[in-house]
Amino acid sequence: MIIKRDLNLSFMNHKERVLTALNHEEPDRVPVFYWAVPEFTQKMMAELGFSDADQLLEHLDIDFRWVEPSYTGPKLVNHKKGLKKDIWGVGYELAGHGDLKYWEARHFPLQGISDPGALEQYPWPTTGLFDFNSLAKQCGKYKDYAIMTAPGYSSPGLFRIIQRLIGRDSFLDVMMYNPRFFKVLVDKVTEFYVDFIEKFFAVTGDKVDFIRIADDFGASSGLMISNENWNNYCRPAIEQFVELPRQLGVNFYMHSCGAVRKLLPEFISLGADVLDPIQTRAEGMNPQGLKKDFGQMITFSGGLDEELLLRKSTPEHIKEGVRELIETMAPGGGFVIGPSHKLKVETPVENVLAMYEAVKDYSLKHP
């Protein structure tokens, strides 16, 4: 629910700036968000001399903050051995070398299993692994920012979790040829997140501005999902995920990478207020076309090419890219600028700094 307010543009705080853009009005400057792999954030903090992520976000003037309940379950990471697992039982190994290390999924606990009955014996996670009361303090700390459910466990998803449980390579085959087994997987993941959302918002109420639903439905050239599977699995799950938050007036932030233009009417009909991250080099995701056709119905977030521009270009080219993107997407509000994908560990820090500096410079020159 977007509430109109009579705001003095010269004195907007971060939350007011985001909600103004969301209301399709122009704020004092284009809101900005930050999204990166943990390894890049650590690298950037080290280069800039910051001891925690909040210092970094404040330095970059980021308008959003993420909140999540404290994890209180068994230890998941063994740094000495370079191993970890997540609450779903998916195993990861530390891959790469030097400063370019990252966690890569290697163990898919339900790969090769086809009997739906076997899923009843699987150790599914419960919400008892989290301390939801820890959210109250976080919401108070970030009251002047646009608060969002954090990526990871606090951003409900469906296919991205099932892919890791059964393996990405076998995902489509299982969905197509073993629908009974797949449906049980969908139900188990959905049940966990409905309970998670209820406990989350029982503490936060309307103090959280956005629930972030995260899945990847698109590749670079088109959708990775049929209309039938969207209607059978994804839409019903998303409807359950957003039902309670929407009753509280919480905005719906839909994350899906890739070429998802054909799903935009579906996202809008589900009540999505924001689409992120806008991979502009994917088919149909041209900023001009998106703004023209859907700009009055949904807010777009992201759009600055992460792979070629931020990772491989120069600060000067990045600043020009920021200017072009703002001039295309920002008129009339409905735009939040940020990277088109997670910032990778190999991305130069100076390029990321150039992105956020360019937003400020543009705002100063175009009051």
Image (cartoon, rainbow, N blue to C red):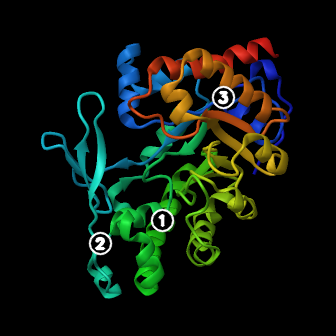
CA distance separating discs 1 and 3? 32 Å
Residue drawn 86% across the image and 32% down it: 6
Front in this rendered view, residue 345 or 6: 345
Amino acid at pointer 2: Leu
Q: Give the left or right position of residue 75, taking residue 203 as reference.
A: left
Point out the tag, 1 or 3, that comes first from the N-terminus: 3
Which label sits in the foreground, 3 or 2? 2
Q: Label 1 neighbourhood size at 10 Å, few (<14), some (14-19), many (20+)?
A: some
Q: Position of residue 28 (x, y in %)?
A: 77, 23
Q: Give the left or right position of residue 327, taking residue 90 as reference.
A: right
Amino acid at pointer 3: His
Give the residue pinned by disc 3: 14
Front in this rendered view, residue 309 or 326: 309
Q: Position of residue 111 (x, y in %)?
A: 29, 71
Q: Quadrant of residue 165?
A: bottom left
For the question of whether residue 140 can be seen, the reply is no
- Per the image, label 1 sits on a secondary structure element best described as helix
Residue drawn 50% across the image and 60% down it: 157
Image quadrant for the C terminus?
Answer: top right
- Per the image, label 2 sits on a secondary structure element best described as loop
Which label sits in the foreground, 1 or 3? 1
Say above or below: 18 vs 259.
above
Point out the tag, 2 or 1, that comes first from the N-terminus: 2
Q: What label does residue 110 carry, if any?
A: 2
Q: Give the left or right position of residue 85, taking residue 216 as reference.
A: left
For the question of whether residue 7 can be seen, the reply is yes
Give the residue pinned by disc 1: 159
Point out the tag, 3 or 2, that comes first from the N-terminus: 3
